Image (cartoon, grey):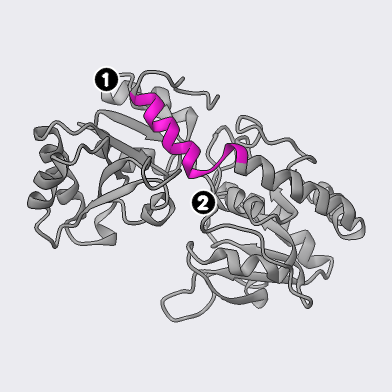
Amino acid sequence: MTEQSRPRVVVFAADFMAPYWAPEWEAIRLAPDEPWRETLAYAAGQGPVFAYSMNCADAYGAGIESFQRQALVECRRHGIPTVWHTIEDPNHFEHFREQARGFDFVFTSDREMIPGYRQFLGHEKVWWLPLACQPAMHYPLPTEPDAADFVLIANYYPYETRVEAVSNLITPIILAGHSLALFAYANPDGTCCWPEPFSAHWKGATSCYDVTKFYPKGRIALGLNCQTHQTTMTSMRTYEALACEKPFLAAHSDAYEPLGFRNGVHFRWTGSREETMAHVRLLLNEPGVAVAMATIGVLFVWENHTYAHRLQRILAAMDGKAKPGELT
């Protein structure tokens, strides 16, 4: 999208997603510690297409939820259409859903939550808006000469489905003696957030914004999901690993097929330890298969799953041209 065609968008209480959206729109940012009402009054005269906010919690900044409600009211007073987007469904649907009240257009990262929002909010202006890759941030780099067999960029969470995914995907790889480069957030004391025996493979801390530089440290990228069953939400790691042109082996998710991914074509996914090791043998012993799959995968996400595509979906929904549960 060219500089001239980028829409102006008012953005508030959405710092987490701001770097991913930045290349797609001209952001007019409202910050609670700045004279945001004056900024908004000025922005209203600049023809913003909409105002964007997302699920947020006071844990990330004192009073952020109160600021979100105030900014929402002011946007409506200035006649600026408002968009709310949550990336925390389905795990935190009940925690954040109240924030969706009052927004003109609501977007959820999980298609299965659309009926719940419609019932809760009393309207039907709810759409599926998955996460995506941002090619300006996620791009291929050469695999390092001393790369481990596998690279995993993921935090450890004690969710039942996450533990199941770890058991099916990561445990058999470690037990088989394969090398693993693990990157994850650090605990407050600077130690790995993963328990033993996984923490022994930790190579250092990463944020969600610098992941691209870590993918070259493994031949095959591994993927986990906080959500696996009866949900169409999958982690941003799925999109970014493919955008970095890595052969990708992931724990099963019910989201993959609705998103258009095909097992063995764009990447491979597994639901058991036996299946994992079959994929491992193929990908490590037949590098041509892994490279071909990575090439198809990167082209697929570039053509279907970028934040440029997600912006067009928001605009189409606002124009009444997007189907709530279908990306096509």
Answer above or below: position of 12 versus 85.
below
Q: Looking at the picture, how far across and down is residue 119, in whole percent?
A: 32, 21
Can residue 2 be found in the magenta stretch?
no
213 w.r.t. 316: above or below: below
Instruction: Name the magenta segment's main secondary structure.
Output: helix
Q: Which residue is under mark 2? A: 134
> Of marks 1 and 2, which one's residue comes earlier in the chain?
1
Q: Marks 1 and 2: CB-CB under 8 Å?
A: no
Residue at 36% x, 54% y is 18
Q: Identify which residue is drawn at 57% across, 61% down.
A: 154
Q: What amino acid does circle 1 point to?
A: Gly
Density class for disc 2 (Cα within 10 Å; few <14, some 14-19, many ≥20) is: many
Kindly identify which residue carries mark 1. Answer: 122
Q: Relative to 196, is 306 on the left or the right? A: left
Tell me if residue 313 is in the magenta stretch.
yes
| Badge 2 amino acid | Gln
How many numbered circles does the render carry? 2
Q: Which quadrant holds residue 90?
A: top left
Whether residue 297 sits left or right of residue 225 in the image: it is right
Identify the residue shown where x is 66% and y is 77%. Answer: 200
User: Which region is colored magenta?
Assistant: 303-318
- Determine which quarter of the picture holds residue 229: top right
Picture coordinates of residue 328, whole percent (x, y): 55, 24
Query: What is the distance, in whole Å, between disc 1 and disc 2 at their CAs?
Result: 33 Å
Does 157 sit left or right of 84 as displayed? right
Q: In the rendered view, would you say 116 is above or below 270?
A: above
Residue sitting nearer the eye, 252 or 249? 249
State the mark number for residue 104. none
Q: Could you tell me residue 291's position as x and y percent? A: 81, 54
Secondary structure beneath disc 2?
loop
Quarter containing the N terminus = top left
Q: Is residue 21 left or right of residue 284?
A: left
